[in-house]
Image (spheres, helix red, strand yellow):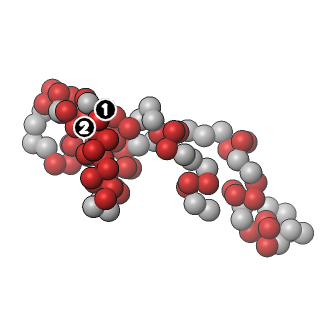
C-alpha cells in the first residue's frame, strides 16, 4: 500500500506550516520568535520553495512534521488490505 493511495497533498495543506517550522528547528539556533518570523515559515511562496528544495535534496524526514487525518471508511478495502485480492476466500 502506498500512502499516496490514501492521502493527497490537499490533505496536508493545513499542516504544511508545521512542516516548515519543524524543518527550520532542525537547522536553527534561534528562539521561537525567530522561527515564527522566518520567511521560510511565514511566506507561502518562500515556504513552498524551501520545502521543495528539501524534497529535491531527498531530505524527506522533515515531512514527518506534517500530519493529516483520514476516515478510513472512505478508503477502498482492497487498498487497505491488498492481500484480500490474493486470497479472496480467507477472512481479512
Quadrant where the N terminus is found in the figure: bottom right
Say whether residue 19 is left or right of residue 1: left
Mark 2: secondary structure: helix
Residue behind mark 1: 44
Q: Position of residue 28 (x, y in %)?
A: 13, 43
Is residue 32 in view from this perspective? no
| Labels 2 and 1 touching (C-beta < 8 A) | yes
Label 2 neighbour load within 10 Å: few <14, some 14-19, many 20+? some
Say whether residue 51 is left or right of residue 6: left
User: Which residue is drawn at the image coordinates 21% and 28% (left, top)?
Assistant: 36
The residue furthest bottom is 86
Label 1 neighbour load within 10 Å: few <14, some 14-19, many 20+? few
Q: Position of residue 85 (x, y in %)?
A: 80, 67
User: Which residue is drawn at the image coordinates 90% and 69% (left, top)?
Assistant: 89
Q: CA distance from mark 2 to mark 1?
A: 6 Å
Mark 1: secondary structure: helix
Q: Position of residue 54 (x, y in %)?
A: 28, 54
Which quadrant holds residue 84?
bottom right
Residue behind mark 2: 46
Amino acid at each position: 500500500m502506498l500512502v499516496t493511495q490514501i492521502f493527497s497533498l490537499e490533505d496536508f495543506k493545513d499542516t504544511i506550516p508545521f512542516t516548515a517550522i519543524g524543518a527550520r528547528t532542525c537547522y536553527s539556533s534561534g528562539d521561537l520568535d525567530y522561527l515564527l518570523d522566518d520567511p521560510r515559515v511565514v511566506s507561502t511562496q518562500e515556504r513552498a520553495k524551501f520545502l521543495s528544495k528539501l524534497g529535491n535534496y531527498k531530505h524527506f524526514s522533515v515531512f514527518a512534521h506534517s500530519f493529516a487525518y483520514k476516515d478510513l471508511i472512505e478508503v477502498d478495502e482492497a487498498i487497505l488490505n491488498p492481500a484480500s485480492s490474493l486470497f479472496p476466500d480467507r477472512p481479512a
